[in-house]
Image (cartoon, rainbow, N blue to C red):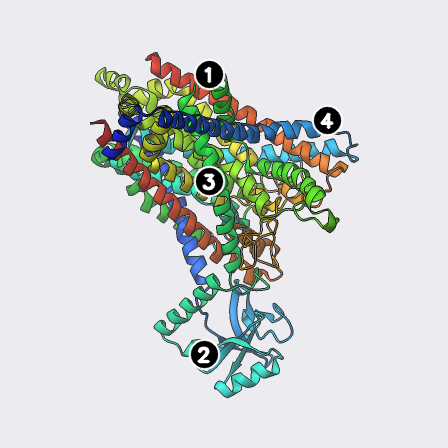
Amino acid sequence: MNAAAKGEAGTWLVSGAAAVCLAAMLALLAWLAFAGFAALWPSRIVDLRLADGRDVLGEIVASSDEALAVRTSERDRLGGGYVRVVRSMITARSEPEDAFIVALADGRHLFGRGDASVAAEVQRDSGSPDAEETVWPNALGFFGRAGLFLRHAGRFLATSTPAPAIAGGVLPALIGTVTLVALMSLIVMPLGVATAVYLHERRGFAASLVRGAIANLAGVPSIVYGVLGLGLFVHGLGADIDRWFFADRLPVPTFGAGGLLWAALTLAILTLPVVVVSVEEGLARIPPSLRAGSLALGATEGETIWRLLLPAARPALLTGLILAIARAAGAVAPLMLVGVVKLAPALPIDATFPYLHPSRQFMHLGFTVYDAALAGPDALRGVPRAFSAALLLVAVVVALNLFAIVLRNRLRERYRALES
Amino acid sequence: MSVNPDTYGAFLTSSHDPALTRRRHRRDRLGALAVQLGTAVVLAALLSIPLFLIASLVAWTPLPEGAWAKLGTLFAGTVKAATFALLVAVPLGIGAAVFSASFASPRFRGWFKPCLEILEAIPTVVLGLVAFATVAPWLKGSVATLLALVVAVPALLLAGGFAFGARTKRIAGWLPLWILPVLIAVIAILVAASASRAPLIAVTTPWNTLLIGLALGLAAVPLVFSIAEDALLLIPSTHVRSALALGATRWQALVSIVMPAARSGLIAAVVLGASRCLGETMIVLMASGNTPLANFNPLDGVRTLSAELVLGLPEAAPPGGAYRLLLLAALALFVLTFTLNLLAAQARARLRRRADRGALA
């Protein structure tokens, strides 16, 4: 075994590590895309004839070597129609063209065979006044199913529901996430930019203290920020605000319970280091000649910063904002302590004055993923829905990050142009 | 960059108008005040974390019975989960960093790094979901397959290097892309071959520490990678070139010159990876089973400080003993991660100082 061969083997080993990282990332994204879309793709209805003479009509939702789990008509309640069918009992299996599925507004599914009049009768018998849709999926071709899939996806994105973990759309969670992140950006951007400017302009003890705090607290786990948000904001500040301004409503808390404002503040502290570091980096990249030129022409320090340095660092500001948003959109653990709920009675933003309701509890896409997968009453529905919500969340976060990466590369080229 | 020439004109003429000059300077002072105020708020907010946690220690509420034993169990669980995660994150992260810094072609690096940045950006709740709902049911019956993969993949790579290494020099900068399909095929074959067998190794629960190690480890890989790669890239390439000129292979130059020189940076990567794994919440919460056990068996479940905080705090009322116990847990987590971050920051700063002085190797 000579040194060259040993070296080649080592190179292959570290290449393998890189390959495993790539494989894991690709597998993760591919599986998310598959599982997220598959949950919304219309499934076929099967008709199983069993050895004991029974007839099972429904969708296969899980299968193992010995048995199938079939969701049949849920006549009484959501999640009340699951049947376990042992494979050896099945004598005949068919996918009849005339099988239909009635999706009721409360999330229940009913199955039957026949034409529209039979379906209408099935729906009338269910005791539920309105059906969301009645379809004959087995009779549909690929494009028909794709259309149905698009309709399901649209409904998933754009409707709200009383049982977000098992049925309907995630619109309130989407709105909650967006409102939260927007409010957080409004808080974190001015503070972060001010701090970055301060660090850029000043040296000395105070600056190094701020720098040290930012560098070392950036790595503190997000859950600790959540504890701070709960202890300091909700139980401390919130309780005080209630005592001073909302005393007439006590003991029902207004700001003394988790809510949008406290969650936004917590996330703002969590994302401050990201913003400060990236804005400061952007300011540091600006050639000193620009600044010297501005001062030489008679501009004050403040005018130089406000009219020259900050506009020149605009892409860095944007990068910081995007990275902060991406980090905040993915942070779930701290929110679970400061006001996220599985079902909020009202949106944090609506058409009644004062439009934004900072004390309201809110729903969040990331929490919906957790809740649907682990805490839902119907796991066979919840887990696929969790994958759909996760896909949505990842799509948003990855798109934001890609945007930030592209922006950062542009930024580098731009400064190279400035320097030459 | 375009600067409006009119603006310059305004600056020049204004100096002749004392009232305007005064106004401009007043605005300047106000702006400086706003910047200082903002910085003060930021500093107060950041410092409030340790101050709040330490202040809550002073508040005197008796702890519930068996509090210290519970904290000890949680602490042991946290360390256990992080240890198994590091077993995944360190070889993958540092291996990928070594490849990217020393062997990869610049174009491969150019998109490999963003790939790992995207992996880092994936919310941990999503990793937790995949671990909980997809990997756990598979791993339950396939612990032996996983172990076989852990042995087989490196062995195959080493064998491949010995057999084809000399002939693949031209593609060495893109080697991971050539290995990737083979790797996927090997994994697929092993997984398919063991699919219908009875499990050789029985697990206590599908949501065990092995699973946590895989998911948490994957979450920590990008961090370990980026810190380690930064450290390796700090080492001047002249060292490597002189070693190559003296007849060393690239691998020898890496192992005997670059890695020892970058040692403190590599240690910082491991320490920061550990800190990340210790504090991670969602993956552990979703995929660990949350069973408070103080043993080191990877096939058992685990419960960590972070998961305890999420599960316990919403129910605990502020002045009570249970609440204080949870704040103690948060403080323990804070002290642990803060110390590790501080150590890692110092190690990295030392390496950077030495690189700036040109005193490396």
Q: Chain of mark 3?
A: B
Give, as a three-letter code, the residue at label 4.
Answer: Val
Q: What is the spatial separation of the Cα atoms under label 3 and label 2, in whole angstroms?
A: 43 Å
1 and 2 marks in contact (CB < 8 Å): no
Question: What is the quadrant of residue B90 in the picture?
Answer: top left
Where residue B249 appears, as percent x and y from the top left, is 26, 22
For numbered disc 4, what is the local secondary structure? helix
Q: Chain of mark 4?
A: B
| First-in-chain label (4 vs 3) | 4
- Answer whether residue B360 is visible to the viewer in this image: no
What residue sits right under mark 2 in the picture? A136
Could you say which disc has been placed on residue B58 in the image? 4
In this view of the protein, which residue sits in the foreground, B111 or B142? Answer: B111
Could you say which disc has been placed on residue A128 in the image? none
Could you say which disc has been placed on residue B218 in the image? 3
Question: Closer to the camera: disc 1 or disc 4?
Answer: 1
Q: Is residue A381 above or below residue A341?
A: below
Q: What is the spatial separation of the Cα atoms under label 3 and label 1, in whole angstroms?
A: 40 Å
Q: What is the spatial separation of the Cα atoms under label 1 and label 2, in whole angstroms?
A: 73 Å
Question: Closer to the camera: disc 3 or disc 1?
Answer: 1
Where residue A407 appears, as percent x and y from the top left, is 32, 40
In this view of the protein, which residue sits in the foreground, A365 or A298? Answer: A298
Crowding near pointer 2: few (<14 within 10 Å), some, many (20+)?
A: many
